[in-house]
């Protein structure tokens, strides 16, 4: 199982890797729901830390609807980070909470060969399987960050297995995100989840505002 930890700096990234993280999702403003990381953090990680960094592309913490200025800003952030990012994490919806394919195509037009994860915006869409089929049309989209909208893994193992199989059959890897903790990790392994994403649960007292919790990350790494 791949353990992905959310980090905000090169220093946090090196520390998370030392504690057992396989890769990081690199962001800024984690308390605002995670926004685009700084250019300096992405470049430093590539040059000094050399840990796979999946870089968030999100200019603001509001709805996943983007103006033309937002889109241009996101494109420029992608272009600046292309030499350093291992992957990009992004998502865009329309006013009906469907995947905004027009915006998605504009963002994918500048990512080159760098793989893309469509983030948890997918959990806001009204029909998850329809959204998967939409994303499967775009070869650059390799992963989905999701918990399928299921709040309690223990009560939904069969549903998790069903959705995992559906995503895999359509060429998409699932990075399970939401409700992942020391108690749920063994259950997710039982459901054949291959990748997990940890944000606040990897921090002291489970709070996004706090520093990384070494004991929790070590314990999670031991369970994977």
Image (cartoon, grey):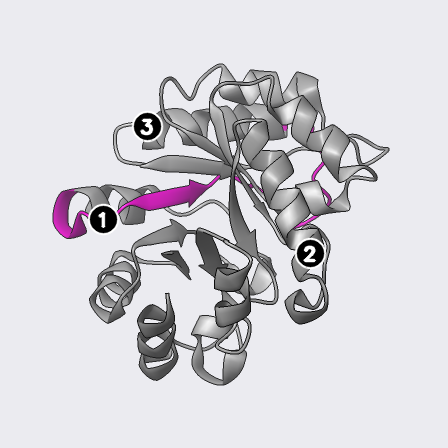
Of helix, strand and loop, which one carries label 1? helix
* Crowd rating for badge 1 (residues with CA inside 10 Å; few <14, some 14–19, many 20+): many
Span highlighted in magenta in the image: 47-69
Quadrant occupied by the N terminus: bottom left
Asked if residue 23 lies left or right of residue 197, the reply is left
In this rendering, does residue 60 appear at all?
no
Disc 2 to disc 3, C-alpha distance: 38 Å
Query: Which residue occupies the foreground of this view, 154 or 217?
Result: 154
Q: Check residue 174 for magenta coloring.
A: no
Residue 199 in the image, given as x and y percentages of width and height: 49, 64
Pick whichever of labels 2 and 3 is earlier in the sequence. 3
Our reading of the magenta stretch's main secondary structure is: loop
* Residue found at the far left of this picture: 48
Q: Residue at x 71, y 47 (%)?
A: 123
Mark seen at residue 45: 1
Q: Check residue 68 for magenta coloring.
A: yes
């Amino acid at each position: 199982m791949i353990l992905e930890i959310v980090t905000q700096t090169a220093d946090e990234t090196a520390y998370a890797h030392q504690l057992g993280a396989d890769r990081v999702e690199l962001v800024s403003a984690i308390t605002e729901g995670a926004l685009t990381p700084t250019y300096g953090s992405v470049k430093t990680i590539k040059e000094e830390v050399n840990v796979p960094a999946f870089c968030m592309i999100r200019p603001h913490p509001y709805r996943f609807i983007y103006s033309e200025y937002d889109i241009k800003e996101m494109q420029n952030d992608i272009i600046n980070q292309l030499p350093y990012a291992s992957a990009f994490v992004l998502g865009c919806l329309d006013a009906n909470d469907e995947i905004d394919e027009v915006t998605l195509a504009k963002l994918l037009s500048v990512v080159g060969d760098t793989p893309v994860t469509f983030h948890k915006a997918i959990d806001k869409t009204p029909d998850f399987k329809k959204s998967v089929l939409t994303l499967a049309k775009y070869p650059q989209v390799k992963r989905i960050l999701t918990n399928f909208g299921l709040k309690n893994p223990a009560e939904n193992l069969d549903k998790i297995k069903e959705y995992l199989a559906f995503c895999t059959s359509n060429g998409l890897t699932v990075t399970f995100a939401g409700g992942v903790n020391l108690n749920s990790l063994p259950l997710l392994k039982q459901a054949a989840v291959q990748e997990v994403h940890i944000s606040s649960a990897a921090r002291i007292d489970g709070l996004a505002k706090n520093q990384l919790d070494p004991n929790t990350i070590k314990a999670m790494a031991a369970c994977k």
